[in-house]
Amino acid sequence: MPRHYYALDLRDDDAAIAEYERLHRPGNVWPEIAASIKTSGIEEMEIFRTGNRLVMVVQVPHGYDASAKRHVDDPMTHAWEALMDRYQQRLPWAETGQKWMPMKRIFSLTETLSADLSAKKI
C-alpha cells in the first residue's frame, strides 16, 4: 500500500508545541475530522515530530490520488484547520496556499540492495 510523506513546521514555541500534541492525542481529535480522513480513502495517517518539524505519513490504497482533496469540504474541516493554523507555520519554500509539503524520497534500502545484486550479475 503506497505511503506519502509531508512536512510542516510548528511555531517554535514550547507551549504551542505542547498544545498541538495534546490536540492530536487519541480522544482529542474531533471525531468528525477523523471520520472525514477515513472516509476520504486514507487507510492510515501518522504525524511525527522532532523539534518543531512535523512529518506526516499517509497510507493510501493503490490508485488513490494523493494530490486530491483529502477532506470533505465542510465547516468542521475548516474550523479544525483554522485551529491548527494557530500552531503551524509554513516551510520557507512553500508557495502561497501550500501547507503540508510533499517530501521526495531520495533513498530506498530495498532498491539499493536490488541494484547492487543486479550489478553483480552483469
Image: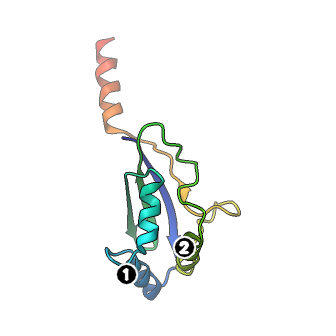
Indicate the secondary structure of the residue bearing disc 1. Answer: helix
The answer to which of 104 and 26 lies nearer the viewer is 26
Q: Residue at x 55, y 61 (%)?
A: 100
- Say whether residue 78 is left or right of residue 2: right
Q: Is residue 114 left or right of residue 99?
A: left
Residue extending furthest right? 96
The quadrant in which the N terminus is found is top left
Say the numbered circle drawn on residue 76. 2
Q: Helix, strand, or loop for circle 2?
A: helix
Task: Tell me residue 42's x, y (percent).
Answer: 42, 52
Q: Residue at x 53, y 43 (%)?
A: 65
Front residue of 69 and 111: 69
Q: Residue at x 39, y 69 (%)?
A: 50
Find the distance from the CA under tag 1 to the CA under tag 2: 19 Å
> In the visual, does 116 lie left or right of 105?
left
Vertical arrangement, residue 102 with respect to residue 92, above or below: above
Which of the two discs, 1 and 2, sits closer to the camera? 2
Q: Residues within 10 Å of mark 2 (few under 14, many from 20)?
A: some
Residue 30 in percent (x, y) is at: 43, 75
Quarter occupied by the C terminus: top left
The vertical placement of 41 against 93, above or below, is above
Q: Amino acid at mark 2?
A: Met
58 up-or-down from 49: above or below: above
Q: Which residue is mark 1?
A: 22
Relative image position of residue 49 (x, y in whole percent): 39, 68
Earlier sequence position, callout 1 versus callout 2: 1
Q: Position of residue 107 (x, y in %)?
A: 40, 41
